[in-house]
Amino acid sequence: MESAIAANKADSIHRMKELTEILREASKAYYAEDREIMSNREYDALYEELQVLEKETGMVLTGSPTITVGYEAVDELPKEAHESPMLSLDKTKEREELKNWLNGKDGLLSWKLDGLTIVLTYQSGKLVKAVTRGNGEVGEVITNNAKVFKNLPLQIPYQGELVLRGEAVITYKDFDAINSRIEDVDARYKNPRNLCSGSVRQLNNQITAERNVRFFAFTLVTAENVDFENSREKQFAFLKEQGFEVVDYVRVDENSIVDAVAAYEERIQTYEVPSDGLVLIYDDIAYGRSLGRTSKFPRDSIAFKWADETRETTLLEIEWSPSRTGLINPVAIFAPVELEGTTVSRASVHNISILKGLKLGIGDTITVYKANMIIPQIAENLTRSDSIEIPKICPVCQGATQIKAVNEVQSLYCTNPHCDAKKIKSFTLFVSRDAMNIDGLSEATLEKFIAEGLIHEYQDIFHLDRYQEEIVSLEGFGKRSYVKLIDSINAARTVTLPKLIYSLGIANIGLSNAKVICRFYNYDLEAMRRATAEELSEIDGIGEVIGKAFEDYFADEDNSARFDKLLTELVIAQEEINTEEQTLTGKAFVITGSLEHFGSRNELKELIEKMGGKVTGSVTSKTTCLINNDIASNSSKNKKAKELGIPIVTEESFITEYLETDSQN
């Protein structure tokens, strides 16, 4: 009997060590490296398992996440110790437990925002310090970055020392807008929390400013000589008076708490700020403080985590989805179920390691849920038949596949360097706004079409109408989306020659260079296709490297054949050349800063190019002038122009000196 007990305890200790290491790695990835290696649900389940084992054994191992908080701060920013430790919150998924926890007291129920916690210090009405939560004891000083948060007051009416805590966040709208500007799907941010964390901890606060980071206050730590009448709610009112946005909250008691949680649960479906739960805190400040704290949690507040709505369903198939990097992701297709108000029928399995861990098989009974009520995931496999065969050939090109392990995570890859799925980057450029300008063909959509075998070459895009049924049935598509796509494709059949040349993706040939080459050859396509590197290098701004790339592209028989096929689908719009208007020929300009007379930099750029000039991105000795309405600015372009003796002119001066004058000559 004693030996059996000892063996069980040894097994428990062994498991505790495993859990401690797994959870520490997950925390390191989440807090210090801005990436996630497991879902919140998985982390919580392992954490709760460790808590149970610690209670059963009466033992807490060194480094256990139940007695430590977060992970050490990274080294890139200065570190500073917090005056008092920033503890995590105890949590529950039971609504009735919140009711019992209040114990007859009033509380404030608010969002638990999913961003990066920041401590702010104001003195004499000015922001003097901002520090991240870090590991709870030591954080990173990000004062300069905080000063460019979208909604943070830099000066407040209160003149004493004010210390408060809040969450830096990026809204879903801003997150989607930032990701939409990143053409490379694999380079896009995974979620708003990761994007926010990276944005807040930048060494250059210009990047922070561009990310639209917002701050929501959730705790007032100290405010000298202010009587809050022992009320947290009055503290919130005070912070609002100082110009802070505070986390959205409602006052609750035992009778209203359950309904209040239900109201938040309904709102989270459309709430614009990322949230992973709720926080309940006593309004009575003195009472909350009298309860003290544990080594890890304060006792005056508790977090409520949404109990994930799960549904049982049947696994119908595993779809293998290739990407441009060669990675082939397994996607679970299951019988449709209703989750959080929507019908779902598929969920990413992410990689081979997770696939094997779930022991999936066709026909298995699985449970599915939405992580943070948004992203469908597999929770459990109740059957665990483990019968899925990992494909030995790529579903797109039929090339050989290979399982590779990166950081102990196994993933499947296509080994064929010429796989169509790997051509995604070139197709993305081809349909982009400055090229063929085909709306409705994002990189993700192109990836789906290529995986389905609908696209192999550029010309195939112009025959997608052959696959109406297949496209309409794809997730995220419908009849309306299909019609819009086909209309956009038909509109793209008429294209200017510079845009067509740019769309081919020839190395170093941007739209500006394409325009320069087209003008040099008077828009004669056949003359351009016969152009030699020597000829091209004589064009101002082209040079030998670009000239060689251009010649080599059209000298390649496969490229030339594909281009001929593409031409059969297109009408090249003839551009009228008015030599009298080419008054800026041989001149190069750089545009920076905001404009007043032109709607955008592109509008001014197009006008300059139409008049024979060239617009570049950096100031060099060949620059005619730098156009900047803020002549006194200390920007890098202004400094460079002054160093080289290049004139800096306002928009109005440019119009007077280069447009009106030249047009009169």
Image: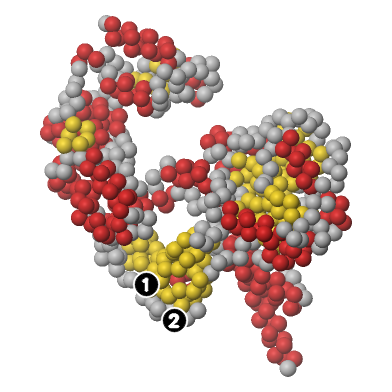
Residue 612 position (above or below residue 544): above
Crowd class of label 2 (few under 14; some 14 to 19; many from 20; radius 10 Å)? some
Q: Residue at x 47, y 61 (%)?
A: 342
Q: Nearer the viewer, residue 256 or 427?
A: 256
In this view, 5 is above or below 468: below
Decide: is 191 above or below 152.
below
Q: Is residue 2 visible?
A: yes
The colour scheme of the drawn protein is: secondary structure
Q: Position of residue 103 (x, y in %)?
A: 81, 63
> Which image quarter: residue 559?
top left
User: What crowding class fits label 1: few (fewer than 14 Cα within 10 Å), some (14-19), or many (20 or more)?
Assistant: some
Between 558 and 100, the residue placed more toward the observer is 100
Q: Amino acid at mark 2?
A: Ser
Residue at the image position 66 percent from the left and 43 percent from the top? 216
**Looking at the rendered structure, which numbered label has been put on residue 317?**
1
Under mark 1, the amino acid is: Glu
Q: What's the mark number on residue 128?
A: none
> In this view of the protein, which residue sits in the foreground, 42 or 257?
257
Residue 460 screen position, x and y as percent: 21, 51
Res 449 → quadrant: bottom left
Closest to the camera, between mark 1 and mark 2, is 1
Disc 1, SS: strand
Residue 398 x, y percent position in the rendering: 26, 65
The relative height of residue 451 versus residue 574 in the rendered view (above or below) is: below
Q: Earlier in the sequence, mark 1 or mark 2?
A: 1
Q: Position of residue 118 (x, y in %)?
A: 68, 45
Measured in 3D between alpha carbons, the distance from the residue under mark 1 to the one under mark 2, in whole angstroms, is 13 Å
Which residue is the site of mark 2? 385
**Residue that appears at 40% across and 21% down:** 598
Q: Is residue 554 left or right of residue 608?
A: left
